Amino acid sequence: MARRLSILKQPIFSTFNNHLIDYPTPSNISYWWSFGSLAGLCLFIQIITGVFLAMHYTPHVDLAFLSVEHIMRDVKGGWLLRYMHANGASMFFIVVYLHIFRGLYYGSYSSPRELVWCLGVVILLLMIITAFIGYVLPWGQMSFWGATVITSLASAIPVVGDTIVTWLWGGFSVDNATLNRFFSLHYLLPFIISAAVIIHLAALHQYGSNNPLGINSSVDKIAFYPYMYVKDLVCWVAFAIFFSIFIFYAPNVLGHPDNYIPANPMSTPAHIVPEWYFLPVYAILRSIPNKLGGVAAIGLVFVSLFALPFINTSYVRSSSFRPIHQKLFWLLLADCLLLGWIGCQPVEAPYVTIGQIASVGFFFYFAITPILGELEARLIQNSNVCEDLSPRKLSHIFKNSIYVVK
Amino acid sequence: MAAKQALQKAFDPIWNWASRRYQAAVAKELKKYGLRYDDLYDDLYDLDIKEALSRLPQEEVDLRNQRLKRAMDYSMKHQYLPKELQAKQTPYEPYLQDALQLVKEERREHAELGSDLPYTRSLP
């Protein structure tokens, strides 16, 4: 009687129960599967700290920098809000990059989870736009000049490029109009991200999570609560400690000191560098000497990520059983780290050449994906070297099965 | 033709060597969890796999599910099959590939005839 009357079985609550409490989860998912919920936590932290920061921030070119200093010095807990928000963005990207690389290693992007992956790429794109816009708001030197460099890229578009840039700026240079609209968009986009996250989770729950072996896990599933709730909680606590180290002991180590200089349109910094999480893409942009080519290369990065589930030809998901893909994965990871290092180096020899080679290496991973699955299958199916694969008659397989010719 | 055969003759030893190394590497991992290569084929990945599994004898499917469950259990515990059991594994003994090839061949025939297989037809 009590179970029928349980609140968890009533409408709305039953949705909560079906997707967060009694939800069937593969029993063997490791801590690499906790980064998804951790990313959700980071989004929540960014929204809450952002809303409270917005109560004290002024989006005007003459007051923005000072309002941030006001938050840091005068607002009670303002320093904590600011450091949580600034470092929270870095944490968000660390978590999401680990989440993406987990997906690459274990083949979480492959069928039937193509939609989950594609929505993830959309979320990444929205995050990048949000973070870029948010970095402009303090109106420091890097804020201003980073905005100028990146928004100017749109001028590479033939015919309408300059018109688009003027429209983006709201004027003829990055100025007050730009700052105002960036503040408005920076407030709006996280809620768009939240909606995308809900759809991302809905798509995930259609077929359920992948697992480290990449096999069908329907034979052994356990309830999300309490098992995965506790596992995620452990990860959340570890994250809180990691996050706290940055907030309380090294709050500016991930930032650039030039952003503590108020923006000066008359003085260009020696090296204009974006935040660390943009460096790999920045390196790819700079490796192409042509402006439009560089923009196209950035577009190609996201097209490649988007297309990955559809160009994959491997029936085997997990890299544990794909030695060649495993090595390519580690090469890709090393390549991305190299690109990140190149992104913060000046545009001169030998960094230019290294950057170009690393950029080719990045795209090589995606270019080889359609061939790799087929190659691995043929290597396995080569019956010349494996006695288990010697030709067998069909009849003994179907001796007891009902087989109807259609 | 002769050039092609000569090329194949030169390439075959390299290909066989690469296959041997690759199969050994994959077999090592499969044996740790007591899996067969065909167990890695997920019926969620491709409906043809689901159809092929439905044509197998029930005992073959039951054995597959038992191997999957055992592998999931070992994976969850971060353990491997005991060494003596690993030695007995036959990771490349096929049970699905033939049925899968047949299903794919049927799909190709249906596509040529312009008719859809029941499990691919969408609602009218």
Image (tube, coloured by chain):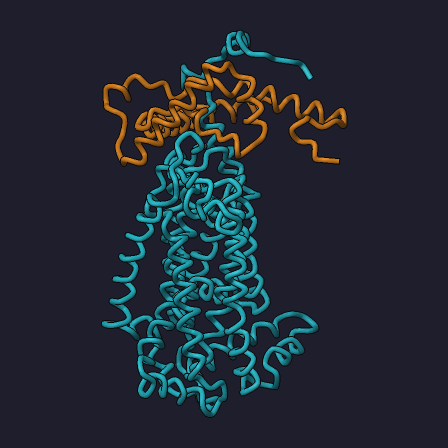
Which residue extends farthest front? A1
Q: Is residue A64 left or right of residue A173?
A: left
Q: Is residue A244 above or below residue A101?
A: below
- What color is chain B drawn in? orange
- What color is chain A drawn in? cyan
Q: Is residue A176 above or below residue A295?
A: below
Q: Position of residue A35 (x, y in %)?
A: 38, 53
Residue positioned 40% across, 48% down in the render: A102
Front-lying residue, A366 or A74: A74
Quarter holding the N terminus of chain A is top left
Q: Is residue A82 left or right of residue B57?
A: left
Residue positioned 52% across, 64% down in the render: A126
Q: Position of residue A374 (x, y in %)?
A: 52, 33
Front-lying residue, A158 or A352: A158
Can the viewer see residue A68?
yes
Q: How many marks?
A: 0
Can the viewer see residue A366?
no
Where residue A156 sits, quadrant-wise, is: bottom right
Quarter holding the C terminus of chain A is top right
Front-lying residue, B43 or A43: A43
Front-lying residue, A390 or A37: A37
Q: Position of residue A115 (x, y in %)?
A: 56, 47
Q: Position of residue A267 (x, y in %)?
A: 44, 89
Residue positioned 36% across, 86% down in the render: A69
